[in-house]
Amino acid sequence: MTNKQPEANIYAHASFDLTALLSIARAIRQKNCTCDESQHPKSGSLNWAIFVVFEDGVEWVFRSPRKAFGLEARTATEALLSEVATLEYLAKIGCIPIPRVFSYCSTGKNDIGIPYILMGKATGVPLSTYKWDDDKIHSTGPDCEQDPAVLTFSQKAKIVKQLGEIQAHLSNVRFDKVGSLFLKNGEFVIEKCLYPSLVWQGRDEFDEQDIPRGPFTDAKSFYVALIRALFAHARELPMEHHLFHGPVPVPQEYDNFQEYRTATDRWNDYVVIGLKTESTQNRLDYALVGMSLEDNVPLLVEKDNDIKCDGFPLCHPDLSCQNIFVDDELNITCIIDWAFASSVPPSMLLVCPGLPHPRDRIQPCLTKHFAEGFIAAKGYDGEKDLHFSDSSIFWTFVRLVNLDGLQDHVYFSEFMRSCISQEVPPYIRKLRDPEELKEFERILLAYEIDGEGPSKDEKNYFSCVGHERFTLSQHLTVMKEINRDFVADKRLWKWMAQHLKERDVYMYPTNEDEKRGRKRKINEAL
């Protein structure tokens, strides 16, 4: 490690032997190469990467897991090995644009000193170089002076159709079990499933008794495992922004930035009182969600059985704009980040990937282009009777078990309407008495810390935002205690905005308001 230079940018995430890295790259390609030590590593939530440049301009990517975030060391090792196996398997098939792996090691026991994958750099640019939607609300800040080009509808349709073709090719890559690919003694095998619902957000800390990870021999076992992961999360892990009866405001619900910002402020005020997201009641709400999903697993399996195919197709679960590369004509040139790919039940391949992120619902008018691409590329060996209309059931199911979205109450409402044509409140009321829920509540109460009055964090928060906002949030909290079906969603925030605006006009009229008031009185008199 004599060449280590801690002050150089490339060592921001880990110390490693750069000379050894360059030596390995040179030996593989038989060409001289360099690595700019001043480059800032590209970093995601789970990995970081730097670039090696050869004398002829060819670039390779050196990528390594982040130590301080994300996964347990064991899971990071398994994810790296599975990604390599998946990329090598797909390279043999040759129908999916992927980077080529040149060298790897899943542990730090190598000359470089850290676990790594050395692979070819994806051609083209990330799709995130472009704006998927012309979101005016997010284009008003000081950092938005040079907005990227906004994709037109026809350009988005072209991309989505290509994703349909890629999903179709994956639908024909099938295995006899649900799980992730690994290389064992030179053979490709399906083993432990690394699907995100089972390992992300700290869920990999749970053992097999809490969260089974397969491999699974049938679709039902897989779906039940995902729901078990949701139960484990609701029981012990941080809920962060997930408040079932209080979906997070999203820009699409508001006409301008000020309305959206005011709604998010009031949502934060409401959530802070009693730390609602981490409350026993909120966790019980998610337990009810899990019980409801379990009741509908037979329907999911029935949808899978309607697809005439043998085995379980390979799925890339994170087809975000960051992981899709395109050329100047928006042709997809590469798909990266296959670490958590796994085989899945057939219906899940009929779901159009959400963009710009999987948690973002794709526009309904684009889904037909996805279906056209899937059918044209002979997905499921050319099967004609495919029900793409059922995809919303599986998209909302995955959002709920993953807990990776912003509006779980909205997803759950849509899921229940699609499955049993029933609204959420009456269905939830029927589920509140079973012994299974009471046992879950007993477990949560054992973890609960008794405390009276506002917490220190709560007091500090409202000392900054003001007493009026505290009073409003306290009033909403009382309403929630009175009515367990109370949902703090966009309807509430819009009603509050209108009510407070009318109150302010009445109590603090401007000259213009007074003029309008006098004019109304004159008109009424006439």
Image (tube, rainbow, N blue to C red):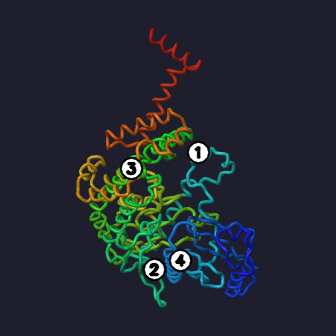
Q: Is residue 303 above or below residue 29?
A: above
Residue 512 on image: x %, y %? 58, 19
Q: CA distance from mark 2 to mark 4?
A: 11 Å
Q: Is residue 396 above or below residue 348?
A: above
Judging by the rendered image, the residue that carries numbered circle 3 is: 450
Judging by the rendered image, the residue that carries numbered circle 2 is: 181
Q: Secondary structure at mark 3?
A: loop
- What's the amino acid at mark 3? Asp
**On the rendered image, what quadrant is the C terminus found in?**
top left
Residue 418 on image: x %, y %? 32, 55
Q: CA distance from mark 1 to mark 3?
A: 45 Å
Judging by the rendered image, the residue that carries numbered circle 4 is: 80
- Left or right: 270, with 210 as reference point: right
Q: CA distance from mark 3 to mark 4?
A: 43 Å
Depth check, mark 2 against mark 4: the one in front is 4
Q: Residue at x 68, y 81 (%)?
A: 21
Judging by the rendered image, the residue that carries numbered circle 1 is: 136
